[in-house]
Amino acid sequence: MTQHKVIAEDSLSAMDEISRVLGKDAVILDTKKINGKIEIIGSNNIEDIASSNAKRKSLNKKSNFTHLFSNHSLEQSITNKKLNSVSETISNIKPINSNVSEVQTNNYVDINTFNNFTNKIENLLKNMIISDMDDFNSGDHSSMTINLLKKGYSKNIISEFKNIIDKEVDLDPELVFYHCLAKKLVLPSEQNILNANIIFINGSSGSGKTTLSSKIASHILDNKFVGNERHKLSIIDFSPKSSNHSELMNFGRLLNLNVSSISTLDEIKKFIEANKNDRKLIIDVSQENKHIEGYTEYLKELCANEKFLNILALQSGNNKLSMKSQIEFYKESDPIIGLTKLDESYVGPEELSILGELNCKIGILSGSRSIIGSLAFAKKEVLAQYMKDMSI
């Protein structure tokens, strides 16, 4: 077969028929509109195709734009027609609000809209990999990055340990990654807590910081003070006067410890200065008081004291953005992370990646269902095993 004529209601239908009969390499020789219908003559004869190509090249030499209107291969013509059909459909859609002025319907957007759009694109692309997939088909560790990304670990934190993992050819690469990340995150903190004279417990409302304060007090009583030395430990509720601190009071009664209530920054400064050498102080800081003017500067000042410790209670299962904002808020006072409520939820790969990227140190692991004898100190072997079990 050399040439074929088709008459149809529209050119797209006609070209589809030419393609079906003559194949995708066919060319259009002639197009006419007769009595409201489209008549197209196509050909798959090699001489016709060669003639059409020569004609197109000749036209292209005359102008950079004439080739847009010359004979195309049938496949490209059909594609262009379909794209035009789609664009026409979109352009015919009317805005919901017909009262929008012409100024609002122009081709420009304000800077805030553009910035919001670019931020969303950056977030979408943050953990994507654009690469030749053949790169992942060679080597013993070819699929590790993909597997860890699927589990939720960030590209930055995976890349940080790539050189170490590549050297350990006889070990499971994912297991090596878990141990590397655990080593980066964990800070042995038991001796720091037992030796510190001033311990601030910060955290958002509902993070379990009051329970954590009581657990730390219980651990200190069991391992630092004995008998009549109990008076050397005090718990301070640092919150507004209107705040209800009955939970902390109840824990104090359970532990047979006095709980003091202080509401202003000046008062807490005076109390600490008067007692820092005579007893250990555990200060439970309310969410409201963290915004007191000068509070973060005071924490930074206390960092110069080697007997000072700032613990940030982060609730497991918390929103990763909330977790990041809390860490950023206290970063200048070098907080040790206490992961709380681990018996209610778990800390996932995304949260662990954030902690790793921000160079945080996890010192305490805590649940919420028991006070006495329920405080655990983070160990890299335990955290590595936790990540491995979580991935199964």
Image (cartoon, rainbow, N blue to C red):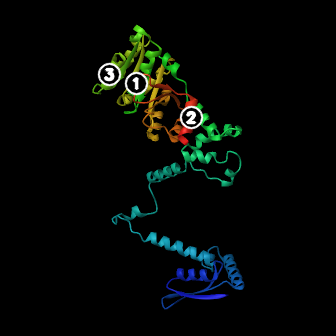
Residue in view at x 52 percent, y 35 percent: 355
Callout 2 crowding tier (Cα within 10 Å): few <14, some 14–19, many ≥20: some
Q: Is residue 58 found left or right of 196 in the rendered image? A: right
Asked if residue 63 is positioned above or below residue 43 in the image, the reply reads: above
SS type, badge 1: loop
Location of residue 37 with respect to 86 vertically, above or below: below
Quadrant that contains the N terminus? bottom right
Residue designated by label 3 = 249
Locate residue 157, reporting x and y percent.
59, 40
Q: Which residue is mark 1?
A: 371
* Residue 82 at x, y percent in the picture: 53, 74
What SS does tag 2 mark?
Answer: helix
Give neighbour class at mark 3: few <14, some 14-19, many 20+ (Cα, 10 Å). Answer: many
Q: Secondary structure at mark 3?
A: helix
Q: Amino acid at mark 2?
A: Gln
Q: CA distance from mark 1 to mark 3?
A: 14 Å
Task: Tell me the residue that label 2 is attached to.
Answer: 385
Of 154 and 146, which appears nearest the observer?
146
Given residues 232 and 99, the one toward you in this image is: 232
**Residue at point 67% right, 47% down?**
142
